[in-house]
Image (spheres, coloured by chain):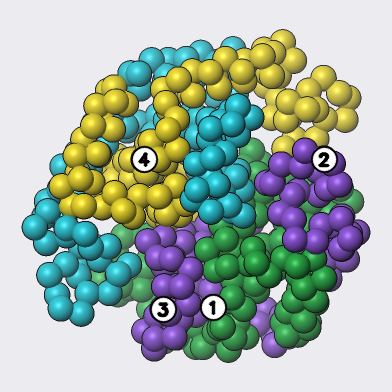
Chain colours: A yellow, B cyan, C green, D purple
Amino acid sequence: MDISDVLTRLRDFTDERDWAQFHTPRNLVLALVGEVGELAELVQWRTDDEVRALARTAEGREALSDELADVFTYLVSVADAVGIDLDEAVHAKITKNAAKYPPELSRGSNAKYTELGTRDAQPS
Amino acid sequence: MDISDVLTRLRDFTDERDWAQFHTPRNLVLALVGEVGELAELVQWRTDDEVRALARTAEGREALSDELADVFTYLVSVADAVGIDLDEAVHAKITKNAAKYPPELSRGSNAKYTELGTRDAQPS
Amino acid sequence: MDISDVLTRLRDFTDERDWAQFHTPRNLVLALVGEVGELAELVQWRTDDEVRALARTAEGREALSDELADVFTYLVSVADAVGIDLDEAVHAKITKNAAKYPPELSRGSNAKYTELGTRDAQPS
Amino acid sequence: MDISDVLTRLRDFTDERDWAQFHTPRNLVLALVGEVGELAELVQWRTDDEVRALARTAEGREALSDELADVFTYLVSVADAVGIDLDEAVHAKITKNAAKYPPELSRGSNAKYTELGTRDAQPS
């Protein structure tokens, strides 16, 4: 998938419904929060194994797919509303994270980068 | 950008640090929530115009890009952890939404699809 | 603790800093989201037992207390911004939930109230 | 309202349904996220004035009250699950914030405390 294809579909969808008026940066961040909440509801009372099992049922798979897709589309829309190229942002951030978390220091550790390599590193 | 390229980079990144042990579905959903919280912090005390202005400064643009990218990478990782093809999920959901929100009924309205076309539609 | 005492302290705090101008309903909801994100960050890479252990260390206890308090104060502020008595709302909602989830039907089940007592109840 | 009264009602509610098994710290944080998402949905497409107007209708007031109450009850439950006295945490945090944000430096400013009194303070 090319994100720009998704963006084109989303913009057409929005234009056909005259919804651009609602798609301000803050409205879209709040809508993103709503969708993340729905994703959280699908996993809140389940163990990790139960979540994985849910993803193997037809109904559960559709529910999870729908919520992941909703988060994705609002995320793409937030980026679009502030004029940021999400593709570029993602690749730049992975490169930045690789520098923040050197493999030799962070291997098997859940410590935050500010605490890597310190003796009393607190997981965070 | 192809999502599968991002996923390949993320998997390599995770493997090099032996972090797969932390990347369970629920851990990743919680990490996604943390990143959405950081995105919300960037817009919480600003108007929409101030958010757009922020995105035009070098520092603000980088801050917004970083948070959007973090949300994206955890979202891709959640989908991967439950074995869902995010690309497929997104296109299927846009098609589903197009059926739920017929242009002629939803034009210019922020009503939820369950209330479209009713006289007393409550925005939601 | 009386919520009205907290509210009085928060209003004084806000007035002394001339911050009421920022405390609109949507700004406060976004600030609440930011704080919930910080709470999520404290538990994202930990098991439940590790979270409980964290709460028994001085530093971890303070971190958790601070985030819980931040969520609480923004929640009280949102309620204040829309003129809702949180005390009254909470007691009314517990009473409502008691009717939605009759003990005999919901005992030991994580099913949503709309699915209680049906043979194929899906946890949700 | 005394938080300990709410906590007593919540514990009784939970015990009568044998739900304590689900009330682990992380499950409750995820449930809190779900409720914050529902609150966000009520304000996502509305201006601040429209949110205030919503709170003056019977139906909207009930919807907002219910979501605020749900966030509150899960927050109280998270605190209980990690053995933290929310009342104490809240008062300690307000005192701490008062020191971080001296009125004379922070008046009318949305700058983060780390940037107070610096010439180039960035709102955050």
How would you rate the neighbour count of disc 4 (Cα within 10 Å): few for under 14, some for 14-19, many for 20 or more? many
- Residue type of the residue flagged with mark 2: Arg
Report the quarter where the N terminus of chain B lies.
top left
Residue on which disc 3 sits: D54
Circle 3 sits in a helix, a strand or a loop, which is it?
helix
Q: Are marks 3 and 1 on the same chain?
A: no
- In x, y percent, where is residue D25? 64, 56
Q: Which of A100 and A14 is in front in this view?
A: A14
**Alpha carbon of mark 3 to alpha carbon of mark 2: how far?**
40 Å
Q: Name the residue under label 1.
A: C82
Question: Considering depth in this image, is D92 or B50 the residue closer to the camera?
Answer: B50
Badge 3 vs badge 1, beta-carbon distance below 8 Å:
yes
Q: Which chain carries label 1?
A: C
Q: Is C40 located above or below residue B25 in the figure?
A: below
Mark 1 belongs to which amino acid? Answer: Val
Residue A78 is labelled as none
C82 over D45 or under it: above or below: below
Q: How far apart are marks 4 and 1 (CA)?
A: 28 Å
Callout 1: SS: loop
Name the residue beneath numbered marker 2. Answer: D119
Q: Disc 1 vs disc 2: Cβ atoms closer than 8 Å?
A: no
- Tell me which residue sits at (23%, 63%) in the image: B109
Cα separation, mark 3 vs mark 4, equals 26 Å
- Residue A43 visible somewhere in the drawing: no
Tell me which label, 3 or 2, sits earlier in the chain: 3
Could you tell me which chain the residue with mark 2 belongs to? D
